Image: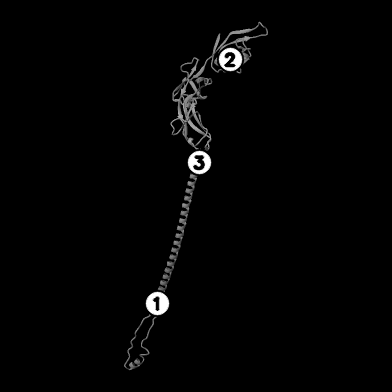
């Protein structure tokens, strides 16, 4: 008996004709379809090639030779005993968010204690510093979910089958949506829907209205068939699974009724009054500015006229002063140029009478010296 050990998913070659223990497996066993090839070589040796080996392929493979002569048949029994070794990842049955988890890479091969392993997540290699046959995940979160596999470091081309790690966690990102999303008219049907992210999915939903102590509904959808003003308010939902619960933010739901119309009218009137007052105030400011500008312009004009009159009087005074100065300058030389001279003549007695007679004619002789 010959026995051989083969690795999972490796290619094997057996020296045999494609017959398993004298039965035509190609017809009887459909699970071998597409995985088997057989061909002879130049030395008339027949090879059988089996790919993608699994545990189901374990067993004895026999050789049978048939000829045209009925009694000339050969069965090579016992044949080759095929045993398949295994490399697989073992994970805990349940992994809850926040806990620690250990993934183990197991094999039926005889490996040394110093064998290093490589770990993969979603077909991407993890850190090379992780070389143990155990992968420790501390404080697991939903981000750690994925497909994990392992391989012996010097045989990275032969990784184990991927195993899915599903991390369980309570509801997250709980939110409420309203349908219809527009304005709600009294009498309409309104549907509130609650959505969440959780593993496993949340199955228990409760609906609450603010300022009310008890729940107003249950289920993932809360339907109000005939909405009226009494239903107006703020609503929220609470999603729950076996790992916890979370509530959503509150949403406001109100009906468009008479009070809404009155409110809108009041808002419009108030806005119109506010705008009118603003325009009136703006007009008053503009008028005041214009009046102030007109007054300033009038004052400037009067000041200019007053300044012009004063300037004219000043120029007249200056001209008069200048004329007086010129007249004064003209008269002064004449006054300064007149000089009076007195001349005394001494006559004899005989000439006294003659002089007396001439006294009326010539009494003073003026001399002008230029």
Q: Position of residue 255 (x, y in %)?
A: 50, 37
Mark 3 or mark 2, which is nearer to you?
3
Viewer-side residue, 256 vs 250: 256
Viewer-side residue, 134 vs 30: 30
Q: Position of residue 109 (x, y in %)?
A: 50, 15
In the rendered image, the vertical position of residue 365 relative to residue 17, given as above or below: below
- Quarter occupied by the C terminus: bottom left
In the rendered image, the vertical position of residue 134 relative to residue 285, given as above or below: above
Q: Disc 3 versus disc 1: distance between alpha carbons?
A: 109 Å
Label 3 secondary element:
helix
Viewer-side residue, 205 vs 161: 205
Residue at the extreme top of the image, as rendered = 71
How many marks do you count on the picture?
3
Mark 2 or mark 1, which is nearer to you?
2
Mark 3 or mark 1, which is nearer to you?
3
Q: Which mark is residue 321?
A: none
Residue 252 makes an appearance in the image: no
Q: Which residue is mark 2?
A: 13
Q: Which residue is mark 1?
A: 331
Q: Disc 3 versus disc 2: distance between alpha carbons?
A: 87 Å
Residue that appears at 50% across and 41% down: 258
Q: Position of residue 238 (x, y in %)?
A: 46, 29
- Quarter occupied by the N terminus: top right
Q: Which residue is mark 3?
A: 258
Q: Earlier in the sequence, mark 3 or mark 2?
A: 2
Q: Disc 2 versus disc 1: distance between alpha carbons?
A: 155 Å
Label 2 secondary element:
strand
């Amino acid at each position: 008996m010959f026995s051989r050990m083969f690795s999972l998913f490796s290619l094997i070659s057996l020296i045999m004709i494609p017959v398993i223990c004298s039965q035509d497996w190609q017809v009887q066993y459909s699970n071998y379809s597409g995985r088997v090839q057989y061909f002879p070589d130049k030395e008339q040796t027949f090879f059988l090639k089996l790919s993608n080996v699994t545990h189901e392929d374990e067993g004895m493979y026999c050789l049978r030779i048939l000829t045209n002569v009925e009694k000339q048949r050969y069965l090579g029994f016992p044949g080759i005993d095929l045993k398949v070794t295994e490399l697989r990842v073992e994970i805990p049955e349940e992994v809850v968010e926040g806990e620690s988890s250990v993934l183990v890479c197991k094999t039926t091969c005889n490996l040394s204690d110093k064998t290093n392993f490589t770990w993969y997540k979603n077909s991407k290699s993890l850190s090379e510093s992780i070389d143990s046959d155990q992968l420790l995940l501390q404080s697991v979160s939903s981000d750690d979910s994925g497909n994990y596999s392992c391989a012996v470091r010097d045989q990275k081309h032969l990784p184990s089958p991927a195993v899915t790690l599903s991390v369980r966690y309570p509801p997250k990102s709980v939110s409420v949506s309203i349908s219809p999303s527009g304005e709600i008219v009294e009498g309409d049907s309104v549907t509130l829907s609650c959505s969440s992210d959780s593993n496993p999915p949340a199955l228990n939903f409760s609906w609450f209205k603010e300022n009310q102590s008890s729940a107003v509904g249950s289920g993932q959808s809360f339907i109000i068939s005939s909405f009226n003003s009494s239903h107006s308010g703020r609503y929220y939902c609470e999603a729950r699974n076996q790992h916890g619960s979370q509530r959503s933010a509150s949403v406001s739901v109100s009906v468009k009724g008479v009070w809404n119309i009155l409110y809108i009218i009041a808002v419009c009137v108030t806005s119109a009054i506010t705008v009118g007052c603003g325009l009136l105030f703006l007009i008053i400011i503009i008028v005041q500015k214009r009046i102030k500008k007109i007054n300033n312009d009038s004052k400037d004009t009067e000041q200019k006229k007053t300044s012009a009159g004063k300037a004219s009087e000043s120029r007249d005074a200056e001209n008069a002063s200048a004329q007086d100065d010129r007249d004064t300058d003209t008269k002064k030389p004449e006054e300064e140029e007149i000089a009076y001279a007195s001349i005394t003549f001494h006559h004899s007695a005989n000439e006294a009478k003659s002089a007396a007679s001439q006294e009326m004619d010539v009494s003073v002789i003026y001399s002008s010296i230029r």
